[in-house]
Each structure stands twice: as C-alpha cells, then as structure tokens.
Image (spheres, grey):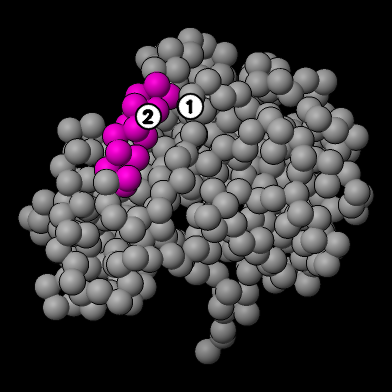
Amino acid sequence: MPQLARRMSRAKPSVIMQVAEKAKRLKAEGRDIISFSIGVPNFLPGEHVYAAAREALAKDSGQYGSNRGTDALLDAFLAHMEKIGLTGYTRAHCSTGIGAKHILYNLGEALLDEGDVIAFPAPYWTTYMDIAEILDAKAVELPCPATQDYKLTPAQLDAALAAHKPKVFLFNNPSNPTGMVYTRDEVAALADVLVKYPDTWIITDDIYNRMLFDGLEYVNFTQFRPELRERTVFVDSLSKTYGMPGWRVGFMAGPESVAKAITTLNSNHITNLPEIVTAAAVAALAGPQDVPTEKCAEFQAKRDVVMDAMNAIPGVICPRPQGAFYVFPDISCAFGKSHNGVKIENDVDFCNVLLDAKGVACVPGSAFGEPKALRISYTCPTPQLAPGLARFQEFFAELV
C-alpha cells in the first residue's frame, strides 16, 4: 500500500474549525449555542460589490487570467495601500493569492528552506506554526504574556534575532488572536532593532489594518526605517475588513523579487484569481467604504461590552485590545477548579466544559501558543453577545 508523503504527518487540522464544527453539530442537535469561536466578520459587503460581480458574470470571458492579478486589481490594492501610508509601490512589487493564508504559505515556500528558522511573537495566528511545520522549518516562538499586554519588546526581538538568526521574522499587527495594536513608538522601536539584522526577511501580516479603534492609525516598519523595504513583505486581505472571507482574495507587496516568486508559485498552484471574484475585489477596494467604516465602529462598541464583562470576573486578566475583533483573556485562575464535578486542568478542558455546560464556544489559547488563555471572537449577532457573556460569567461564578 503506498504511503502519504512524510510532510502530511506534520499537517494538522485547524483547531479553530474543529471548535466551530463541534458548535455547529451541537446546534443541529437542538442545543442553544452561542459561538465566540471562528473569526468570521459576520457581515456582507456593500451592494456595489455584488453589482460588480453580476456585471462580470454577464461578461465572463471564461479565459485564464494573470498569475499576478489583473492591472485593475493591483491598482486598486496600490491605492488602498497609499491610503494607509504605504507609498512608492508599483504593480511589479505586488501579487495576489487565494486569501492571505495562501499568500503566507507561498511566502513560506519562497523564503524558507528545510531547517531554516522562522520567528514570531506568541500568541500567534495558528497558521504560522502550521506553515513552519509543513515546510519543515524551525519555528521560534517569542513569548509575550498578558502581563506585557501580549506585545513583543525591542529587547526580546533583539535577543531572538541575535541568538537564532531567523531567515524570516513574521509580525502581526493588529493581532489575531489578541486584538492588540502596536503604537507608533512601539513599531518604530522594533524597526530600529530589525535594521541591525540584514539577513532576515520581514513579513508583516496586517490584514486588520483598517480595523483599528480609539483613533489609532496603522503603521508599518518601513515608514520609520525605509531601508527595510528591500526585505519587508506586507500581506493584506479582503476577508475581515470587507466581510468577504469566502471570496478568498489576498495580496502582498514587497521587493520585486519576492512578488515575482509569488507570481511564479501562482502559475504552478492556482493560475489566477477567478474573473468574477476579481471584479468584486476591485469594487470592494475602490468603491464606497461606508460598510467597513460602520462595522469598525460597531466592533469597537462590542469590544467595550466584552471588556466590561471580562473586567467583572475576579482573577481574569484581559489586556484591552484596540483592533480586529478579538479579546484574549488569561483564564488560568480557573485551572484546578471544577464545574459540576468536572475538573478543569487547562485551557482545553475549560473550553470543552464551557461549551458542554453553557453552550458557549471559544477557542483554547494553546492553539495560538498561549495555554493560559482563550480567544473570544465577538462578531456574533449583536443580540447574542450579552447573553453569551452572561453565560461566561455564570460559568466562572459556578467554579469550585
């Protein structure tokens, strides 16, 4: 019997999707389930996006397209970048993919050989570790606990780059799973460290760059140290900002050599983005921005509601996020306690017992490299938010 490739032993199913599927199954069985699990924005793009898709469908050529992305799509992406302060790029610096996850995997293939080191702060998005393991790279986690607001310090970064000499440093701002956002001064200080290590590629996975709260603005390393542009790759997506996760459109901008490599991999992997999806993506980026603007304000208000609930639970530590749509409370005060006779030893136990007892689905923090915490995605329908948080508080109150 032929065997699967060895790399498949390193490929693992998504923990986030496993939690979401369990919640979906319980709901189908008649349970009253409130899901704080999967990071789906739960809103739809503006009507102009659908109108563009319908028009493209009526004119569909049925032909193959550009491996890099159409000129119209690249131009719309470049205009979007300029609005967030990333200027001076051209089409030759860009490429596209089937979502940011596909872009990140392609970047891993383009930049990492087997055994190379990739470093990233923890907590991290689950895909970072998945990519490292599938590609047989060595992942170095830089622990950033709740006590330091889940943020990497310049001293940590300096020590890690000096000790491990990573081929790639992967940075996520605003953060999934924590929702934390680095300030201008914090990004500038990290940039000052990065310039000292010219042999390290830098990937900024910043797909929540438009989803910022409290008047904050997105900033990138290259804005403070322009010399970093020759080895920094910016990654973006339509999924979260525009309510289009299922449309699967991702972007990158960076050195021409990297953009060319990603385009070459596209020619081997996917050929091109579909014509109809491309039309919708152009409309999302270039058309009215009222939907993402309104949703950002809505998420900020939801953030405040969730933080009030977290702050009311004795022992829970929850740094205040300023972007994305997540909170990441440290719930380790519950470890060693029991709920209705069921012992909770760790974050996985906590999430399983919470779901079984209260019908609230959250993702264990260990999936993101922080086993003391869990992730709450507060994109559920607004009428479900307060009841779900009340159940969460009740669960804590019932622990003995």
Q: Position of residue 124 (x, y in %)?
A: 56, 55
Which residue is identified by label 2?
A: 299
Q: Position of residue 215 (x, y in %)?
A: 53, 20
Give the secondary structure at mark 2: helix
Classify residue 298 by image quadrant.
top left
Whole-angstrom CA distance, mark 2 to mark 1, is 9 Å
* Residue span colored magenta: 295-311
Which residue is identified by label 1?
A: 213
Q: Residue at x 33, y 72 (%)?
A: 335
Give the secondary structure at mark 1: loop
Q: Magenta: predominant secondary structure element?
A: helix
Report the front residue among 205 and 174.
Answer: 174
Going by the numbered disc 1, the residue's amino acid type is Phe
Going by the numbered disc 2, the residue's amino acid type is Phe
Horizontal side of residue 242 vs 171, given as left or right: left
Q: Are marks 2 and 1 in contact (CB under 8 Å)?
A: yes
Is residue 310 within the magenta segment? yes
The quadrant in which the C terminus is found is bottom left
